[in-house]
Amino acid sequence: MSGGDKAQRKATLQESIAANTSRLRRLNSWSQARLAEEADIELRQVQRIEYAEIDCGAFTLVSLARALGVSVALLVRPSKFVRAQRGRPAQKRTERVSTAANPRRSKPH
């Protein structure tokens, strides 16, 4: 196996762990902070795992699996990874109703 193949397999494994961890966390309606607390790992580590930025050690994989109530095999199962955008989602813009058009909001004379 060449170095490039090994690096690609490693990246694919990281992406599968990221996709599965994120999906299972959302199925539980948990925030990343809640998962970190349940798994007894740092929030930043959960964030980096879900962005496929770091390798998970065996201890971390077991901790995540236990917290999510699944097997380690389910976390490493091949899964499609879609890179999420960082930060909070943009808030939807709502139309402003002018007070002149809405008599209930206009000031009494």
Image (tube, rainbow, N blue to C red):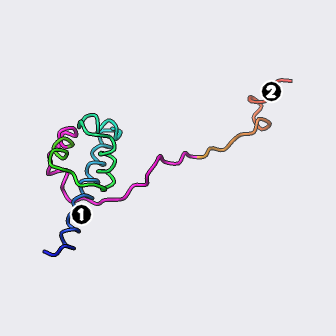
Q: Nearer the viewer, mark 1 or mark 2?
A: 1
Residue 93 is marked as: none
Q: CA distance from mark 1 to mark 2?
A: 61 Å
Residue under numbered circle 1: 12
Q: Looking at the image, is 31 positioned above or below residue 51?
A: above
Q: Which residue is mark 2?
A: 107
Q: Which residues are magenta?
A: 65-92
**Mark 2 belongs to which amino acid?**
Lys
Residue 35: x %, y % from top left: 29, 38
Query: Residue at the spot x=21%, y=51% of the render?
Result: 56
Q: Where's residue 73, x and y in %? A: 14, 51
Residues 44 and 72: in front is 44
Identify the image quadrant of the N terminus. bottom left
Residue 28 position by quadrant: top left
The one nearer the camera, 52 or 16, is: 52
Q: Earlier in the sequence, mark 1 or mark 2?
A: 1
Q: How many marks?
A: 2
**Residue 104 magenta-highlighted:** no
Seen as rendered, the residue at the extreme right is 109
